[in-house]
Structures are given as C-alpha cells and as structure tokens.
Image (cartoon, coloured by chain):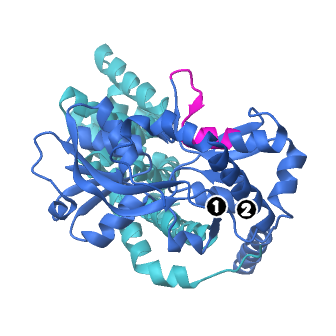
Chain colours: A blue, B cyan
Amino acid sequence: MLRKKRWTVLSVLVIVSLLFAGAALAGTLQDVKARGKLLAGVKTDFPPFGFVDEKGVNKGFDVDIAKALAKELFGKDTAVEFVAVTSANRIPFLTTNKIDIILASMTITEERKKVIDYSIPYFMSGHLLLVHKDSPVTKYQDLEGRKVSTTQGSTGDIVIGKLVPKAERVKFQHNSESLKALKDRRTEAFVQDDMLLVDLQKKNPELKIVGWPPFEPAPYGLGVRKGDAEWLAFVDKTLTKMKNSGEYQKLWDAWFGESKDFLLKLK
Amino acid sequence: MSYQFDPSVIVKFFPLFLKGVWLTVEISFISILVGLVFGIAGAVARTSPVKILRFLGAAYVEIFRNTPLLIQIFIVYFGLPELGLKLSPYASGLTALILYVGAYNVEVIRAGLEAVPRGQKEAAMSLGLNGVQTFLHIILPQTVRISLPALGNNWVALVKNSSLVSVIGMEELTFITYDLNALTFRSFELFGTATVLYLVLIFLLINIQTFVEKRFAYKT
C-alpha cells in the first residue's frame, strides 16, 4: 500500500515538472516592451566585459552594449536590469526565461548553437595562459601533466580538454576563484580568453602571460533563445547600427584601446 | 519553443555521474565517522566540570553552527593559504564538512549525555568502576542509543551539504552535474538525474540508520 502511494507521488512530481519545462513564450521583443525594461545576463567576474566596480555598479563593454539595446528599445539606457551570470549558468538562465539576452563574453561554438541563437559576432578572442613569473610554461603544450585552473563552462576549459587532454584541469565556477587558485600556486596556469587575462595580469604583477599568439580564436556573440527570430533581428539591427554610427568603435576604444596592438581583429 | 526530454545524455554520462556519487559517498562517510568523534569529544567538553573545557566546547559549537558552511569552505580553501596553510581541495572540503557536522553532533550528543539518568553513573561508581570505565561502558552506550535518531538527521543534512564542496573543484555529484550542464545545457535531465541519485543515497542512509537504531534499542 505504502509502495503504491510512493509511486503516485513520484509520478505527480514528474508530470508537474514536465509541464513547467514545456512552458513556452510568445516572443521576447513583445515581452521586453510590455515589461518596460531589459533583463540582461552579464558577467561580474570578467573585466573589461562585465565586472562590478567599487560602488557595486555593473561596468564593462558588454554592460555598455546592454545599455545601448535599452536605449534603442525605450529611449533611455537605464531601462535595463543586470542579472549576474557565470559561464556555466548563462545558457540555462536564458533558456529558462530568467534573462532576455546573454551579454557575457560568450564565444560562438557549434555545441552552444544547438541550444541558443547568436547575434552577429561583436568581438574576436583567442586563449592565452596566465602563469607565475618564474614558471617554465611558455605554451599550452607545456601544460601536459600540470594542474591548470579553468572556469566551468568556459571555452578555455573545453579547449584545454581537447588540445591537452593530459593536463589536469581544476575547475571553478568563477574566474576570480580560478585566478585565486593560481595565485596560491594550487595550479600552475589559468587558461581563459585573451582580454580577460591581460586585464587580470595588469592587476597582478607577479603573474605573466604566455602562449602568444592567442590560440583557438573564435568570435563572441550575444545569445538569444532559439527560434526567436524577431528578437534576434532587433539585436542584430542594433549592433549593425552601432557599428555604422561609430558608437561601437567608441566603446571598443574606451574598453580595449590600450590593448589594441595584440587583440585579434573581427573580420 | 517546445521541450523534448532527451534521456540519451543521462545514459551517455552515467559513468561520470557514478564517479561523482562515489566521491559524495566517500566524503560523507568519512565526515560522518570523524564527525562522530568530534561530536563526542565536544559533548564531553561541554558537560565537563572544567570551566575552560566547557567554554571551548561551546565556542566550537557556536562558531561552526552559526556560520554558513559555504563560508567555512572558502575560508579553509582560499583563506588559510594566506596564513601559510595550504590544504588540497579534498582536505579542505573534508575539514569543513567534519567541523560543521561535528558542531551539530556536539549538541545532539550533549542532549543524549544529559538524558542518561544520574543513577546510572552513581550505580556504576558504587560498583567500583572508575570514571573512564563508567563513561565507556555505562554512559556512552546509552548516550549513543538516545542520540541516534537525531544524529541520523545530521547525517542526512551532511550528505546534502556535501554538494557545497563542488565550489572548490571537488568533483562530487553536484560538481559533475553542474559541469555537464555547462557543456550540454540539458538542465532538466541532468539535475533530475542528480536529484534521483541523492534521493537513493539518502534513502539508503536512512535505512542503515534505522537498522542501527533498532539494533541498539532497548529490548522490551
């Protein structure tokens, strides 16, 4: 008798969960307009794309693009709510409708394309290695048999898993933790996107960057829910408009100007 | 946007899930055993006639019971290296879990100690047992019997709390699930699988606890 009851409870739970999982949306553009503000998934641990300044305010290149989208939507760049995401949870946040768009230094990959749609590329990035000044590591091939900090869900993690399967990856949820593990010499290197590491190195002079030129380069894209054509068209249109008006270049210079000599160029 | 349940990811990654389950079982088991020793030692200290021991026992409980386990894990793993003590993720995670469950055990075992009737101790002493013998043969077995149901609660909480060590790169069940989710984005299938695995684990643990409880129960 008791056993029968257990099964009933379990089946009800499963059915309810399936119903919720299947809940669908009409279209993000209408939703955003009806809501009166944009829900933007941005990073807080990824300078200069998305970080939080001393006053607790979201800043960065991705943050500025989100503001530009809000301006295009509502005529004011304050009609945006920033939702902190990590490399690992940004896509689930989007697919479960917690955010309208991912602006989180996200590389366009085939794997991710199966789940979400991408805007036109807006940044070009490769991977580098952050190591201690006294480290013998000079290129990613040297990582074989060594401990490497990676961030869960990042392409840095995926790329090292593919290129140097014998490297021992120690994975963290945030870049700040991956960096701390390297600084404590728990790991010998931290593999991530070039621009982030350049920024982190500036704040941590005991570390250096190796592995030039950036390997496995790929463009970044903004992420929207799959099949939401109207919303994607709006995002692409806004990005193109920003590029044509020079606003994109202005933002690029402001955030990356100092690093323009080595950053990869977007075709 | 329609949702399609895809069991193939569960099948494909099941060996990885089992690896995670194994580490969860391992750290939970060690924490339960060592945490019991901490609990008994702390409870004896808290009920000791020596004031400084009572104070130390109380301080231990209050510090570890009244702060989040996540913060304790971060302090051991990221904080202590700055003071020169660098423990591996495994050692850091275990240390935090043991100290945490130990603090909860102290209170449960203290209650058990205090529930043993005074007459038991007096009778043992008058039979000529010394203090240590009285504690080991008379008091402790009765304390364990009284405390077991509440200890079981602590153990269940511990197995669930062990998921927190995933933040320092320990590849237990939650870490594996989170990591696979970051790669495949099949959240429902993956977290659903983890849910079922935790349910099974804790169901087994409760059964073991009930079995032990029955073995130790007063025979009427």
Q: Amino acid at mark 1?
A: Ser
Question: Do callouts 1 and 2 mark residues in contact (Cβ within 8 Å)?
Answer: yes
> Between B201 and A258, which is closer to the camera in this rendering?
A258
Please rate how many residues cluster around mark 2, counting C-alpha atoms within 10 Å: few if below 14, some from 14 to 19, many from 20: many
Where on the picture, by quarter, is residue B57? top left
> Between B89 and B5, which is closer to the camera in this rendering?
B5
Q: Residue A62 magenta-drawn?
A: yes
Reading the image, the residue beneath label 2 is: A232
B176 relative to A236 in the view: left or right: left
Instruction: Name the residue rendered at 75%, 62% in the picture.
Output: A233
Residue A261 in picture, x, y percent from top left: 34, 44
Chain that bears disc 2: A
Q: Which residues are magenta?
A: A54-67
**Quadrant where the N terminus of chain B is found in the figure:** bottom right
Do marks 1 and 2 share a subunit? yes
Instruction: Name the residue rendered at 53%, 60% in the picture.
Output: B220
Residue A31 in picture, x, y percent from top left: 85, 53
Reading the image, the residue beneath label 1 is: A119
Q: Amino acid at mark 2?
A: Leu
Instruction: Name the residue rendered at 45%, 49% in the picture.
Output: B164
> Between A63 and A250, which is closer to the camera in this rendering?
A250
Residue A117 in picture, x, y percent from top left: 65, 67
Residue that sits furthest to the top in the current view? B51
Please say whether residue A33 is visible from this viewpoint. Answer: yes
